[in-house]
């Protein structure tokens, strides 16, 4: 398998914990994920590669089982395009346009604890007004864009240096995913605002 490995897990609830300072219970699920071992492989699979600024325009998408349990979920977030590196979409894009990105995580109100975050593979939602290098793939079934490899398609930028923000590195420590460090390093060298 040149450059990428496919890992398969059954989707299941595997972790739950609470951020006591802001009353958010986090529930993490695993899923089948392609593991990218190089930026070249991310670039090859991506339909759209941009630097984008996360807006506060979000909407939860939730699909329920007949028994009332959550079956599928995402946060639909509008991202303002800052720079375009690759666009294989049918739609033309320009700097300043907004694209809808489906993030594999949601925060919902929970009557018991306050808020609950459901996430896949530990994905953390983009922060409003922060810039990210995004490797996005179009899902033709849902007609939406999502980060490649769940956590591997989103890299935060540092506003001061216009390169990847290593101050954000703690955002990814909980993944225990050595390949991400390698990807992070490669992206920081190649993808900049300038």
Image (cartoon, rainbow, N blue to C red):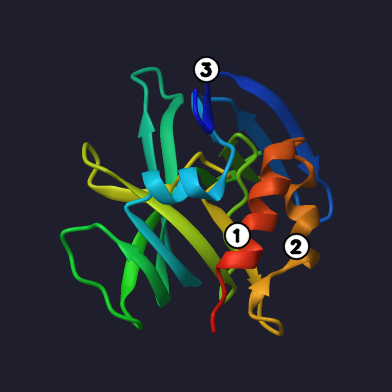
Hey, which residue is sitting farthest front in the picture?
2
- The residue labelled by disc 2 is 168
- Of the numbered discs 2 and 1, the one sitting upstream in the chain is 2
179 on left or right of 140: right
**Which disc is residue 187 wearing?**
1
Image coordinates of residue 13 in percent, x first then y, are 61, 22
Disc 2 and disc 3: Cα gap in Å? 28 Å
Q: Secondary structure at mark 1?
A: helix
**Compared to 46, does 176 lie above or below?**
above
Disc 3 and disc 1: Cα gap in Å? 25 Å
86 on left or right of 151: left
**Compared to 154, does 189 lie above or below?**
below
Report crowding for label 2: few under 14, some 14 to 19, many 20 or more residues within 10 A (C-alpha): few
Image coordinates of residue 55 in percent, x first then y, are 47, 72
Image coordinates of residue 16 in percent, x first then y, are 72, 30
Q: Is residue 57 visible?
A: no
- Of the numbered discs 3 and 1, the one sitting upstream in the chain is 3
Report crowding for label 3: few under 14, some 14 to 19, many 20 or more residues within 10 A (C-alpha): few
Disc 2 and disc 1: Cα gap in Å? 14 Å
Instruction: Give the image quarter of residue 163.
Output: bottom right
- The residue labelled by disc 3 is 8
């Amino acid at each position: 398998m040149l450059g990428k490995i496919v890992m398969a897990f059954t989707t299941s609830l595997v972790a739950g914990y609470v951020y006591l300072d802001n009353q958010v219970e986090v529930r993490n699920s695993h899923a089948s994920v392609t593991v990218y071992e190089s930026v070249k492989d991310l670039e090859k699979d991506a339909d759209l590669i941009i630097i984008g600024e996360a807006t506060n325009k979000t909407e939860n998408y939730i699909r329920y089982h007949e028994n009332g349990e959550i079956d599928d979920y995402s946060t639909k977030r509008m991202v303002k395009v800052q720079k375009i590196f690759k666009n294989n979409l049918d739609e033309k894009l320009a700097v300043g346009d907004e694209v809808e990105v489906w993030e594999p995580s949601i925060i919902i109100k929970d009557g018991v604890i306050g808020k609950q975050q459901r996430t896949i593979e530990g994905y953390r939602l983009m922060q409003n007004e922060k810039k990210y290098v995004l490797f996005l793939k179009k899902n033709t079934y849902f007609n939406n864009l999502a980060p490649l490899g769940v956590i591997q398609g989103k890299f935060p930028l540092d506003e001061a240096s216009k390169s990847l923000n290593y101050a954000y590195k703690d955002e990814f420590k909980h993944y225990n995913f050595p390949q991400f460090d390698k990807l992070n390093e490669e992206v920081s060298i190649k993808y900049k605002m300038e």
